[in-house]
Amino acid sequence: MKLPTSFPVTALAAALLATTLAGCAPLLVGGAAVGTALMVTDRRSSGAQIDDEAIELRSTARLREAFGDRAHINITSYNRQVLLTGEVPSEQMKQQAEQIAARVDNVKSVVNELAVMTPTTLPQRSSDALITTKIRASLVDAQDLQANAFKVVTERSTVYLMGRVTPREADRATSIARQIGGVQRVVRIFEVASADDLRAAGVNLPSEAAVPRATVAPATTTPAAVTPPPEVRPPATGGVVTTPVR
């Protein structure tokens, strides 16, 4: 459900944080609930939204069967592209997790951002959940963006942005994420399309009149406090642009 911009940010943060923490388990799915209102305003087709939910559930089940509690893996699917984040104990398990996710029905590509290290602590996951909540709330408040066009994932203070957006929207959302306290870096995994192409596909784009000019930073400008991210391997299929922000 898309909340109005007048909805208190603190209330939204508390609700989303409580929901996220309640689901903290070794294997987590990254998708939000799909309701009627969300399916109408989402830029994916209804079929893609249903596929994404199924991909997350099936991937979770298969990874849990393979690894049990030995790994902490988050699975997020957007338009049938899967993002894996979290921690695993070995490089072999990292590659195995990617292979398992890639074999799930309807998966087009996998971006494997799993780290080989000990699992994060509950305080770190709580901090990540709060960062995600603040970014989502800021996207809701941004009158020149459609919050439902984005998926936000935070892992160890790194923010991953997914969605089907224009170049302007990609830069605007990146600028918003960078301004949230605690964010160390932002990685963009977007399907970038022109405004004309999105309108031709039936997307009703928001007005750009409300864009605060001072906050729209180009993707090549990185504050000194934000460390450069590692390269993210481009997905195997065409049409999707995976762009790390430096």
Image (cartoon, grey):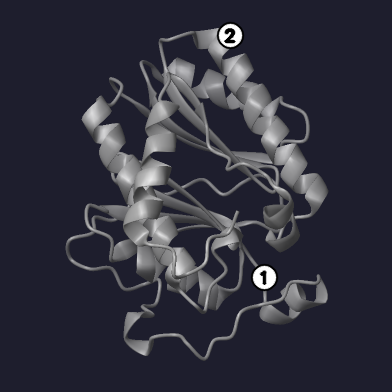
Q: CA distance from mark 1 to mark 2?
A: 37 Å
Q: Residues within 10 Å of mark 1 (few under 14, many from 20)?
A: some
Q: Is residue 215 above or below residue 157?
A: below
Contact flag, marks 1 and 2 (Cβ < 8 Å) = no
Q: Nearer the viewer, residue 160 or 114?
A: 160
Which of disc 2 and disc 1 is earlier in sequence? 2
Q: Nearer the viewer, residue 97 or 41?
A: 41
Q: Residue at x 44, y 70 (%)?
A: 6
In the image: residue 188, left or right of residue 199: left
The percent coordinates of residue 14 (x first, y second) are 34, 46
Q: Nearer the viewer, mark 1 or mark 2?
A: 2
Per the image, the residue denoted by label 2 is: 65
Q: Is residue 115 above or below residue 158?
A: above
Determine which of the numbered discs, if any, sits on residue 193 in the image: 1
Q: Is residue 230 visible?
A: no
Specify the amino acid type for callout 2.
Answer: Glu
> What secondary structure is marked by label 1?
loop
Q: Residues within 10 Å of mark 2 (few under 14, many from 20)?
A: few
Q: Residue at x 81, y 76 (%)?
A: 200
> What secondary structure is marked by label 2?
helix
- Marks counted in the figure total 2
